[in-house]
């Protein structure tokens, strides 16, 4: 499959060892495809086994989480933390609470996170974690008890200079608050061990908005430099209706786009007049209800069962912001047939390998997640800086730093794409730009 014996061997060994980890292998394959030309030019990578060392996490911690539900019944869940790579800084990456969480998902996310964090140019290594706990339908006290039980195990492995987790799917401000409270109680320390904290106890303004806003800043740069256009008067489809999706839709609207469709895991809404975000925020952030509810509140809007069909909606710009592998080849073909000009990823690995290849082959502007959604972790990095300095910056200050970071990520990604021979191949651009720094640091640090 690969041109060189070395990369082939690395991938085949990985496949042999981790045949039960499809998401991890998918992420590794995409990265190796991009990195192969770079590896061919830098012989020390093979000599010092950098690819083998880079693809294997430094450690993967698995633990059980035992807690008691409202009925007094004992519950057992699995907890994970992958500390993937610390070559350029302490491990950093979110925690995901979702029934699909397993080793494969956590490892793919940790690997992607390592390159993403490097792209931000901030000193952060890669990590990720979570649990197969399903927060859906749980009471507030059940969430509290689970978060406390989870942190009672996790606290042993994290710290502000070692490993700094944040939120991800199923982990928002409430869960971070409960986990921070438990960490503080156990350790007797008040520090920046988690990011995504509430404003009253060390959080950063604009962190909540950062991934979605950053995605739109990246998309704007891509539209400007590759197609000489912008969001103005463009029809936009955003999948998901969680943290990333809501603030991506908000910024896309501010920049002149019209968001016409959003989804949750059951189905999607279509509003030809443009989605009313205050209604979505009320339903998803306040009531924690289903997106279907939107049609009861906004006349002239529609609901369709089945979230995947959202990609049949005609649009100029598509922003997948829900979950991995939510956009397959059929969906990519439908989008291109309907005239999409730009697809930028808010969620992690939403496009299958075939879908992303199809976009690039058709000269669709395609912003891969590790570059396009790096605004969240970049702003987490800014939260860490504020915590260390015991300062808090204004919303405008953080937002402006976020904007500058996203502009630079796009520039570095584009430069590497051009060097690799196709300015539309931002996938290779992002992988090479992220890997270069990690690789240099690994070589400099010896073994
Ligand atoms: P949330 O839990 O806030 O929201 C996830 C959203 O996606 C929910 O609306 C959920 O619906 C929906 N969803 C889940 N599965 C599907 C599906 N199969 N089809 C359609 N919709 C689905 O998570 P976030 O917004 O924080 O994260 C979304 C993605 O962005 C993830 O891939 C995450 O890793 C990535 N990301 C998040 C960052 C952050 O700062 N939060 C940073 C960088 C990346 P339902 O309510 O039905 O479950």
Image (cartoon, rainbow, N blue to C red):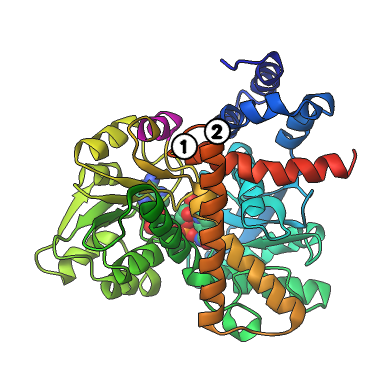
Region in magenta: 352-359
Percent position (x, y) of residue 294? 22, 66
Residue 36 is marked as none
The reply to whether dot 1 and dot 2 touch (C-beta < 8 Å) is: yes
Main SS of the magenta part reads helix
In the image, taking residue 124 as reference, residue 225 lies left or right, namely left
* Residue highlighted by disc 1: 425
Percent position (x, y) of residue 178? 62, 72
Q: Residue at x 44, y 53 (%)?
A: 346
In the image, taking residue 68 as reference, residue 320 lies left or right, namely left
* Residue highlighted by disc 2: 420
Q: Residues within 10 Å of mark 2 (few under 14, many from 20)?
A: some
Residue 138 to residue 439: above or below: below
Percent position (x, y) of residue 156? 81, 59
Q: Quadrant of ligand 1?
A: bottom left
Q: Residue at x 34, y 72 (%)?
A: 281
Task: Name the quarter where the N terminus is drawn.
Answer: top right
**Which badge, 1 or 2, is on the more N-terminal residue?**
2
Q: Is mark 2 within 8 Å of ligand 1?
A: no
Q: What is the residue that sits farthest to the right in this orientation?
A: 446
Res. 361 in view = yes
Does 185 appear in magenta?
A: no
Percent position (x, y) of residue 102? 60, 41
Q: CA distance from mark 1 to mark 2?
A: 8 Å
In the image, taking residue 164 as reference, residue 366 lies left or right, namely left
Task: Name the quarter where the C terminus is drawn.
Answer: top right
For the residue labelled by badge 2, is the local secondary structure a helix, a strand or a loop? loop
């Amino acid at each position: 499959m690969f041109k060189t014996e070395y990369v082939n061997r690395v991938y085949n060994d990985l496949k042999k060892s981790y045949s039960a980890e499809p998401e991890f292998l998918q992420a590794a394959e995409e990265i190796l495809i991009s990195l192969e030309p770079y590896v061919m030019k830098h012989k020390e990578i093979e000599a010092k086994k950098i690819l083998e060392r880079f693809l294997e996490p430094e450690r993967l911690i698995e633990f059980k989480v035992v807690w008691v539900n409202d009925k007094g019944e004992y519950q057992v869940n699995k907890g994970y933390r992958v500390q993937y790579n610390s070559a350029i800084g302490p491990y950093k990456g979110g925690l995901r609470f979702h029934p699909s969480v397993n080793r494969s998902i956590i490892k793919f996310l940790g690997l992607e996170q390592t390159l993403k964090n490097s792209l931000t140019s901030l000193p952060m290594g890669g990590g990720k974690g979570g649990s197969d706990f399903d927060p859906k339908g749980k009471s507030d006290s059940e969430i509290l008890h689970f978060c406390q039980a989870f942190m009672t195990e996790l606290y042993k492995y994290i710290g502000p200079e070692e490993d700094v987790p944040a939120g991800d799917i199923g982990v928002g401000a409430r869960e971070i608050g409960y986990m921070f409270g438990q960490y503080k109680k156990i350790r007797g320390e008040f520090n920046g061990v988690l990011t995504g904290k509430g404003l009253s106890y060390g959080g950063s303004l604009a962190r909540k908005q950062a991934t979605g806003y950053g995605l739109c800043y990246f998309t704007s740069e891509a539209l400007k430099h590759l197609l000489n256009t912008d969001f103005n008067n463009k029809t936009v489809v955003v999948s998901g209706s969680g943290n990333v999706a809501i603030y991506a839709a908000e910024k896309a609207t501010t920049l002149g786009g019209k968001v016409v469709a959003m989804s949750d895991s059951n189905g999607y809404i279509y509003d030809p007049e443009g989605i009313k975000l205050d209604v979505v925020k009320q339903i998803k952030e306040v009531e924690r209800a289903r997106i279907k509810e939107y049609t009861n509140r906004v006349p002239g809007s529609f609901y369709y069962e089945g979230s995947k069909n959202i990609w049949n909606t005609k649009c100029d710009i598509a922003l997948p912001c829900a979950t991995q592998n939510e956009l397959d080849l059929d969906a990519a073909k439908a989008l291109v047939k309907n005239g999409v000009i730009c697809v930028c990823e808010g969620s992690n690995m939403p496009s299958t390998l075939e879908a992303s290849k199809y976009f690039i082959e058709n000269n669709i502007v395609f912003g891969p997640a590790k570059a396009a959604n790096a605004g969240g972790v970049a702003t987490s990095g800014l939260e860490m800086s504020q915590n260390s300095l015991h300062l808090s910056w204004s919303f405008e200050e953080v937002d402006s730093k976020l904007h500058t970071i996203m502009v630079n990520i796009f520039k570095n990604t584009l430069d590497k794409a051009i060097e690799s021979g196709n300015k539309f191949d931002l996938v290779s651009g992002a992988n090479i730009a992220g890997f270069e720094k990690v690789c240099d640091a690994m070589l400099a640090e010896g073994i």
